[in-house]
Structures are given as C-alpha cells and as structure tokens.
Image (spheres, helix red, strand yellow):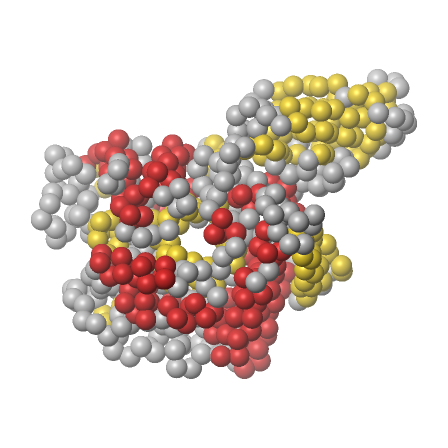
C-alpha cells in the first residue's frame, strides 16, 4: 500500500513545526485507493490510537488538541487495506522529520509542544555576537599580581605553550596578560565591526588561563582586573549598544578553590579539609579526602552536586551568584556543559536570572539537538520555555563544515536546517548561537582547509602554519560559512580573531593572541560587510525562512517579511532577501 506524509509540509501537518500547548494540529495522510481506514498513533506520555476520518478517496485527516503542559509528542500511522492487512508508516530513520517510510514502525515524528508564553530576549534575534577568550584579546598594560606556577609571556605574539600535566593534558598556566580594561579599550573596534553582544569565556578567579576551574565565583580573576573593572566594562559597552554575556561554569569547580581548597591556599575551610566545611555537601567523596567524583574523571575539577540545597541557595538566592553578576551589568549567562546540569537546577537558574532582569539571557552549551537530548538516562527538551532561552548551535556548525569540506551535499545541509526549524519553537530557534569557531575546536580557517595537524603530538602542532594556498582556501570557505550564518535565524557569532584569519590547531593553539598588528584586514572588511548586512535587514533577523538545495553544491536561502509582519507577528516593512551559498 502506498502512503505519504511529510511533517514539514503544511499539506500534511498544519501548522508544521512546534505547537503551543493547548492548540490544535491537523494531521493528513495520503493513501492509495485500496486503503479502507487509517489510524494515527499519538504519544504524549500516554499512547493513543486515534481513528482518522476519510476526506476523499486519497486522504485521511484528524485534528488533535495538543497537551495543556509542555511535553514531547510523537506520532506515526497505520493504514488498513480491504483485506484487513495493516501497514505501518513512520518517520525517516535519521530522526530529522520530513517524508516518511512505508513499513517503518520503529521511528515516529516529533512535535515539540511549548509554553505559549515562552519568549526570549529580543536583542538576541537581531544581534551579532563576538566571543572573547579574555587572556588573549588585548592587554591594557596595567599591572596585575602574578601567581606561582604560571608562565607570563612578555611577547604578545608568542605561540601558546602546551604544558603537559599528565598524558596529553594541558595544565594551561601560561598567560599573555589580556584583561578587562584591554577589552574596554577595543570596544570601538567591536562596535565598528557590528557587534552587539560580547560573550566572555570565564572571568572568575581560577588557576588556569581558561578559567573553567573556578576558584571563586564572586571575584573577577585579579589577572583580568577587579569587579569594578567589570562594572565599568559593562557600562562602557552599554553606551556603545553592546551587551556582555558571562560564562557560567556551575557543574564543577577547581580543586584549587575557596570551596574545595585542596592545597590550603584560602583562609576559609574547604570541603577537602574538613567534613564540617560549609562546602562539604557540595561534593561527593568516595574515599575522603583524596578520592571524589570529578568532571569527566579530571581530578583538578571536582564535580558539584547540583541538587544540594546549600549550593542552590548560594547560586539562586536574591544576592546569589546568578543574580549578583546581572546586577553588576551582565546581560546573562552562557552555561558551560548545560546538559550536565539537572533540569531542576536549570529551571531555578532561569527563574533567578529573569527575576533579576526579565531581559537576561540563559544560553546553554548543548552539542546535539536540544529538543530531544539524551543525558543521564533521560530525554531532555530544553526548548519548552522552562529552562534555556537557546543553545550553541553545534549541529549546524558540524553540518556546515561538512558541506564546505565536501563530506555532505547541499541536500544534507538543507535537511539539517529544516529539521531544526521543525523541532525548535520560534523564540528558541531565532535565538540560536550560530558559530563557526570556538575555544573548544581548532580555528575555523584550519578546519575549512583540512589542516588541523591532529596526526602530530599536541606539543608539535603549534609549529605548523598554513601555506598560502591552504589559507586562501580556508578563508574563502570561512567567509561563505559566515554568509550562511548571517542568512539563517539565530545570532551569528564570531570567535575573536577569526575575522582576521587567525590560525591554530586544537587547544591551546586555537586560543592564540589577537593579531592587532598583522591580521588579514581584507578578510575583516568582508566579515564586517556580512555582519552589517545582517544588522540592517529586518528580514534576515526575524523574517520567515525558506531554504532549498538547488543542486549538491548550492543552497538557496530566502528570508521574507510579508504582509507587514515578521515571524513573531510584529509589524515590519515588507522585505525579501535571497542569498545563495556555494561551496
């Protein structure tokens, strides 16, 4: 029996995409004339077998009210022929929606239901983000205290040092002196580039240069400046129309911290020093004090029990960490390893942030589809209005890189984009952090020309540089990738220095110093033009999206404001922009 349903077509599902709780969705199934009846199998926590109504000789349909509370819903079909034989019809095996497969009873289509009051900060949808690794962006020249066990580069243009601490682990204790005042000095540069949001990698006191081993959540690392320097940075940025977003590392701390205090460097009593410590309940010891649960088995990063009441109070109370930094001027938080925080923790964090400032952002690091992420034995949906505003869009990054490297064709990239459009509610989808480069991966120009030198030992990768031909290939593809990110819903993000063609293999070499004296200014001008095109076009910010693969090498993106309304129903001038992406 021939059957047909395409979850991304309004002919088959109306409306397509996510559905607000309590609204109705119309399902339609096309069947050959031999079909006697059809059933919609619908799951919203309870499995239901719902008979469909015959519209005519070719179509069956059914209208279903969505649940009153947010939940992931799933559906597929069964059709019966004149002889009573049942044929299953389900979703594609890759889980990306679209046209179904006859005989497939194992995969269902997804409908994300969400709180109808769900909204996200509007400044994300229209903004341009810039990510800064604070030690490497710009140094003001102000004197800051030095620490033991650290190496301080006098030459700004040195290559970062791989400092092995065991195996290939990098203890990351070489510093270049970038600081908050240095960032403040370069705000005019960022404003001219088109930036409206700066995302700072961690700035709190820590032992390493990356500062994901937090030592004190309440203090800016003295190597970067002071708490007052942060307040001044936020104030100066605000005057230029730029917001500052902080990196919150709340799943673990450093072993060398005021809370754990393994080496006794702090005057207070840490969890590693006494069972009576106020911080002892935060951690899980298997054999006190030397063996404890730590993040991904890294002993320098003791893991926190996110459900501990005293830790939650420390984070979420009126003067807690989440709220006090928003008070000081932060626009909100990017959450490190958000999928390692419990859903309860995320809900309370969101409430605390929004209580301090209703326009504050809560953006998560989630590397997979955030509508059905599997973590710690449960399926989690981060886009229903109760946890995150949005996430870092690593699936798009991975697909785009594969496309430009020739590992995926335009049809595959188009399919990924349509899948996200289908699964993510508009407030979430239009707030995605769309990135090409980050501190966690080799530089974009290296990846895009296929030269990351992963075949070499880590300590030797810093010796290598791209040839002229390799660089030209990488930068051409990077500019085309930035064109893609600026054309799609979400906030395009530039990792510091990528706009000037910075090179580098994986950590620590992707975290080099900004090339203020010898960067690629032509590349910078090209990136700037793309960012300002995005900033000046309401259609590219909040217009409706249509994406099509023209052939295996070409993607066509159309963004449109029509009938004087954008995708959120807000009034706007009619505008249509068509952008071709070629590899």
- Residue 518 visible? The answer is yes
Figure label count: 0
Horizontal arrangement in the rendering, residue 28 relative to residue 467 (left or right): right
Q: Position of residue 30 (x, y in %)?
A: 82, 32
Q: Tell me which corner region of the image, top left, top right, bottom left or bottom right, holds residue 227.
A: bottom left
Residue 416 vertical placement versus 141 (above, below): above
Q: Quadrant of the C terminus?
A: bottom right
Task: From the viewer's perspective, tell me whether residue 259 is left or right of residue 18.
Answer: left
User: Which residue does the image show at 39% across and 71% down from the upper left?
Assistant: 188
Picture residue at 24% right of the left edge, 41% below the top: 319
Residue 386: which quarter of the image? top left
Q: Where is residue 122 in the image (x, y as percent from the top left)?
A: 49, 48
The foreground one among 190 and 506 is 190
Percent across and percent down for residue 114 are 54, 33
Q: Residue at x 27, y 61 (%)?
A: 232
**Is residue 505 visible in the rendered structure shown here?**
no
- Quadrant of the image containing the N terminus: top right
- The image position of residue 42, as x and y in percent, is 65, 24
Is 314 rendered above or below residue 537? above
The quadrant where residue 531 appears: bottom right
> Residue placed at 27% from the left, 72% from the top?
140
Q: Which is nearer the eye, 62 or 48?
A: 62
């Amino acid at each position: 029996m021939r059957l047909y349903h395409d979850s991304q077509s309004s002919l088959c599902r109306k409306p397509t995409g996510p559905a607000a709780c309590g609204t109705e969705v119309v399902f339609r199934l096309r069947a050959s004339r031999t079909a006697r009846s059809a059933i919609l199998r619908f799951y919203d926590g309870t499995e239901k077998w719902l008979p469909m109504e015959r519209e005519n000789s070719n179509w069956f349909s059914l209208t279903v009210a969505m649940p009153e509370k947010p939940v992931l819903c799933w559906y597929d079909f069964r059709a019966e022929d004149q002889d009573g034989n049942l044929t299953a019809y389900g979703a594609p095996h890759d889980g990306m929606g679209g046209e179904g497969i006859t005989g497939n009873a194992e995969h269902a289509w997804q409908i994300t239901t969400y709180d109808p009051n769900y909204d996200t900060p509007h400044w994300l949808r229209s903004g341009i983000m810039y990510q800064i690794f604070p030690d490497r962006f710009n140094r003001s020249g102000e004197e800051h205290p030095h620490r033991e066990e650290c190496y301080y580069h006098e030459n700004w243009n040195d290559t970062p040092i791989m400092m092995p601490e065991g195996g290939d682990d990098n203890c990351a204790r070489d510093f270049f002196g970038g600081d908050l005042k240095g960032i403040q000095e370069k705000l005019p540069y960022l404003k001219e580039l088109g930036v409206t949001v700066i995302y700072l990698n961690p700035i709190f006191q820590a032992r390493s240069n990356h500062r994901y081993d937090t030592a004190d959540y309440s203090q800016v690392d003295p190597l970067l400046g002071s708490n007052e320097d942060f307040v001044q940075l936020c104030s100066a940025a605000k005057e230029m129309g730029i917001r500052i977003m902080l990196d919150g590392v709340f799943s673990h701390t450093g072993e060398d911290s005021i809370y754990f205090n393994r080496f006794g460097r702090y005057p207070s009593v840490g969890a590693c020093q006494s069972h009576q410590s106020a911080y002892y309940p935060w951690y899980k010891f298997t054999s006190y004090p030397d063996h404890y649960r730590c993040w991904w088995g890294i002993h320098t990063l003791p893991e926190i029990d996110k459900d501990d009441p005293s830790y939650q109070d420390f984070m979420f109370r009126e003067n807690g960490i989440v709220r006090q930094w928003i008070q000081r001027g932060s626009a909100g938080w990017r959450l490190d390893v958000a999928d390692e925080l419990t859903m309860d923790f995320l809900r309370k964090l969101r409430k605390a942030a929004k209580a301090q400032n209703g326009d504050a952002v809560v953006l998560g690091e989630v590397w997979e589809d955030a509508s059905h992420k599997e973590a710690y034995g449960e399926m989690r949906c981060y886009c229903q209005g109760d946890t995150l505003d949005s996430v870092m869009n690593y699936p798009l990054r991975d697909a785009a890189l594969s496309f430009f490297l020739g590992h995926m064709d335009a049809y595959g990239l188009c399919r990924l984009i349509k899948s996200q459009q289908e699964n993510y509610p508009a407030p979430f989808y239009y707030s995605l952090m769309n990135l090409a480069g980050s501190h966690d991966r080799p530089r974009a120009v290296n990846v895009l020309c296929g030269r990351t030198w992963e075949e070499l030992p880590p300590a030797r990768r810093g010796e290598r540089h791209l040839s002229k031909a390799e660089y030209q290939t990488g930068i051409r593809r990077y500019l085309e990738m930035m064109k893609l990110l600026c054309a799609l819903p979400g906030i395009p993000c530039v990792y510091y220095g990528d706009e000037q063609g910075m090179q580098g293999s994986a950590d620590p070499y992707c975290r080099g110093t900004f090339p203020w004296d010898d960067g690629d200014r032509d590349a910078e001008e090209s990136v700037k033009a793309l960012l300002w095109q995005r900033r000046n076009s309401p259609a590219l910010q909040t217009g409706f999206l249509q994406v099509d693969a023209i052939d295996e090498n070409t993607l066509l993106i159309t963004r449109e404001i029509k009938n004087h309304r954008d995708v959120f129903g807000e009034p706007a001038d009619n505008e249509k922009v068509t952008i071709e992406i070629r590899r």
